[in-house]
Each structure stands twice: as structure tokens, then as C-alpha cells.
Image (tube, rainbow, N blue to C red):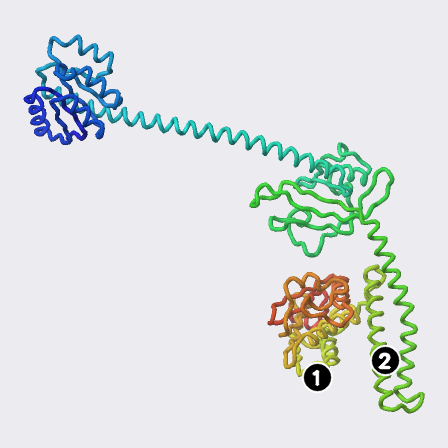
Amino acid sequence: MINGKIIVVDDEKIVTSAFKTLFAVEGIKGGAYFNSPLEALEYMKNDAPDLIISDFLMPDMNGLEFLREAKKMYPETSMILLTGYADKENAIKAINEIGLYKYIEKPWDNDDLMMNIRNGIERSHLLSDLRRKIKELEEAKKQLEIYSTDLERLVTERTHDLSQANQKLSGIISHCADGIIILNNDGKIEQINPACENLTGLTETSLLNQSFDKIVKGCKTDDSIDGSGLFGLDYDNSEVLLKDCTVLNSLSGTHTPVEINFAAINNDEDSKPEKYVGVIRNVSAQKETERLRDDFIATLTHDLRTPLLAAIQTLKFFLDGSLGTLEEKQKVLLSTMLQSNEDLLGLVNALLEVYRFDSGKLELCKTVFSPKILVEQCIEELLPLAEKKNINLELVCDFDDKLEVYADKGELKRVITNLCGNAVNYTNKDGCIKVILKAQSGDLIFSVEDNGNGIPQADIPHLFMRFSQGTSRKRSTGTGLGLYLSRQIIEAHGGKIWVESKLNKGSEFTFLLTNVLKEDEERQVANG
């Protein structure tokens, strides 16, 4: 079955009728038949044909003239000219001039005619598709030219911006007061800036491919970083701070105290970092300022202890009646003064302890003792405060008094009292505090759980720092040194202290001491 619009033009009605009959027999639909070429041209203005079949000799307009006009309207349409034997030369001329698809002599063979009709329609469709594709390609070419022009302009702009940024970055690196160092993932130096050259006394060329350890000594990684990659960096950590480092100057032989902030350079977030960039900051002035400050505080607090102790003892003499009988109002006033002086003495002692730990002048005095008995003593001392607020203070321990630890009893008591005291202070009336003591594989684990107001997550990283008081929502009236000193004591034992908290649900402070348990011989035998 042939699908397509076919226009047949012949001035003889018998011919157009014959085509109509032939098309009906062959099942061809969509044929239009005209005895006047002018009528056919008018019809084609509104409807594009797939094939045109025209007679050569017609009165109003001959076939060549008609097909020439039709060609102007539809260049892709295939055209067949019907000619007599005598018109062969004109038909060949029409093929050359107009670009006819075929000419067929009268009388024609129906099979041959149908084959040419099929091929002609197919040719028209192919030419039409080709023309459409060419048009689409031309449009695409124009669009591509526009894109190419825009891309060239964008590349030029981005290249200029990148060049400007690189110049600025190079200027910053070259004139930065801090040393900048770039390492590969093997810890080898790839690049340094002039400030780093000044710190080390070596040129960049002499340090290339050298180990980082060649110029930096004694690094201690920040406790907040926990990773398995270079300097504690892993895929999830963006940076790591190296403290207590020194840089050796090869020319002068001096060791400059520095802090180094390292960050990973990741081309792919899911892969191991290829490089690390570190900023080396000279902290000599900071260290000297801290030393002077700590020495001043230590001297001041030490000198304050003697007059405070004298004042406290004098007030006690007044209160116990050694210096005469006092009225009740006088006792109340002197008791208040005594409490204030004792609080001040506590602050002075805490400052001295902090100074001793920071300066490394305090040595632990370790003995063997029962941690359960120690914790029970601390709880007993805090019971009056807990009962005053109707707080249930409970001890949960998974071992008996015979289990002992090797540690500094006095310092651990300070930590336990501080943690339990904080729990009592921050727990509301009718609350509950649970003190948990566990022994596990030679380690001692101590925890204090309360159902107080909890601590905001933003405040937790600052709790164990100096002079940190309570939270951003509620401040304590204490010194702000208790948790800091507790951390120093636990770390001096080689342990770790941390806190977990949820708002309106409570907090849990925990410390872990490793390899401190001392079990008796019977317990060791029982455990195999």
C-alpha cells in the first residue's frame, strides 16, 4: 500500500480518470486529479504533495512550465512527466533544467508506473528528511558557534580571574608572617614559603623531599582529633592542630616553639588526601607571656595563702569563744567572713595546683588503696548538700573493698569530689544522682550520672578549659578551675576524662584510668 499525496495533471479527463481507477485498484489514497495546471498550482498553495505527475502538452500551460512553477514551491517533491514518443527531447531537456525524477512515455506500463510512483514518493520523503536534517544541522551549527564564542569569552574571563587569584595567593604566601609548608601523604616536604625558610635557616631547595621530622620536633596532637591518617588526619577530619612543637634553626641552632595547623588537600572527598598544607606559627612571645602570667599568679597566690590562713584561724578563735563570748549577730557576721575567706583560700589553692600541673612541678604520689572506700568517703562528705536538696545520691559498684588501685589517692579524691559536687549543684530538687564504679581488664571506670538540665552541645568542648563556669545558659559561682584541674589530674595518670549530655535529660561525667587495678593473690588465682 502506498501512502502519500499524489497530484495528477492532464488536460484529458480520460487520463485523469484512468489514474483514479488505477489508484483505487492499487489501494492508493490521497490522490488529487486536475485537468488544468493552473487549478493544480492553486491547490498546491495550501497542500504540499509527495509526488506530481503531469502531462507535457496542455493548452493553458505546458508540462514544463507547470513543473517549473511547482519546483519553485516544493523543491523536494519528486516529479514525473508524461510524454509522447515525439516529446522525448523536451522531456530530457526538462530533466536537465527542472530536475525531473522520471519521464514516462505514453502509453505506459502500469507495473512500471506503480514502481516509479513508489520510488518517487520514497525519494520525496528522503529528500524532505534530508532537508530537515540539514536545517537542523545548520541551526545546531549556529548554536554551536554561539556557544563556542561564549565559551571562549568565559574561558578568557576565568583564566584572567584565576591568574589574578594566583597572583594574590602567591603574594599572600610569600609575604605571610607565618611559615607555610606543603607535604605529600608520605610526610615529605614539597613546598615552603620564605617565612618557613627563615624559621629553619634552610632554603626551599635544600628541604625538598626531606622528611617533616627533620625540621619539626616534639609535636603533640590536639586531643580533639582522633584519626588514623597522617598527623591524625583522616577522610572526615578537616584539620589537626599540632602543639608543643619546636622548629630547629640549622644556622643558629635555636629551637623555636611553634604551633602547626594542618589541613588535608582533597581532590576527591572519597579518596585518601594527596597533600597536606600546614601553617607554622611562632609562639615564642605567647609562651613567654604565659610563663610570666603563670609565675605572677603562682607568686601572688602563694603570698596570699599566709594572710588568709592567719585570718581564717583568727576568725575560728573568735567563733569558738577563745577570745571571749560573742553575741549571735557577731557570730553570724564572723561565720560569713570565715566562709568567704575559706572560699578564697580554695581559689588560691586551686590556682596553685593548676600552676604546678601546667609547669610540670607537681609529681603524683601514688599509693595502693581501695577506690570503693575512697568514693564512699567522698559521697559521705557530700550527703548533707544532697539531702538539703532532697537529692537521691546512689553508689553502684561491681566490686568489693578488697580490689585496690595504684594511683594518687589525694588527687583522685579531688577529682571525684569535684565531679560529684558539680552534679549536686546542677541537679534540681528531688533529683537523682548515680555514682558508678567499674573494674574492667585492669582499668578503673568512674562515672557520675544526673538528671539535671543538661549541657548544650556548643558548651561541651569548653568545659575542661581554664575558668570555664557552667554553661552559656547558667553560670556557676565557682572558680572555673575544677574541671580543668580534674582533666590535668586524670591525664597525669595517663587516663582520659569526658562528658556526655542531653538538654533537659542530664549529664554523665566519666574518667578512665588504665592498668591501675591491683588485685590480691586469691583474686588473681580465681581469675586464672
Give the answer, above or below, for where 5 lies relative to 491. above
Task: Specify whether 499 is left or right of 113.
Answer: right
Mark 2: few, some, or many residues within 10 Å (few <14, many ≥20)? some
Q: Amino acid at mark 1?
A: Lys
x then y, percent, for residue 43: 18, 28
Q: Amino acid at mark 2?
A: Met
Residue 226 located left or right of residue 132: right
- The residue that mark 2 highlights is 337
Quote the CA–CA distance across marks 1 and 2: 22 Å
Q: Secondary structure at mark 1?
A: helix
* Circle 1/circle 2 CB separation < 8 Å: no
Pick the quarter of the image with the N terminus. Answer: top left
Dot in front, 1 or 2: 2
Residue holding disc 1 = 388
Relative vertical location of residue 372 with respect to residue 97 in this rendering, above or below: below
- Locate residue 69, reporting x and y percent: 23, 19
Does dot 2 land on a helix, a strand or a loop? helix
**Residue sitting nearer the eye, 370 or 33:** 33
Between 373 and 455, the residue placed more toward the observer is 455
Is residue 455 something one can see in this rendering?
Answer: yes
Task: Give whichever of 516, 264 is nearer the camera.
Answer: 264
Query: What residue is rendered at 69% in x and 40% in y?
Result: 183
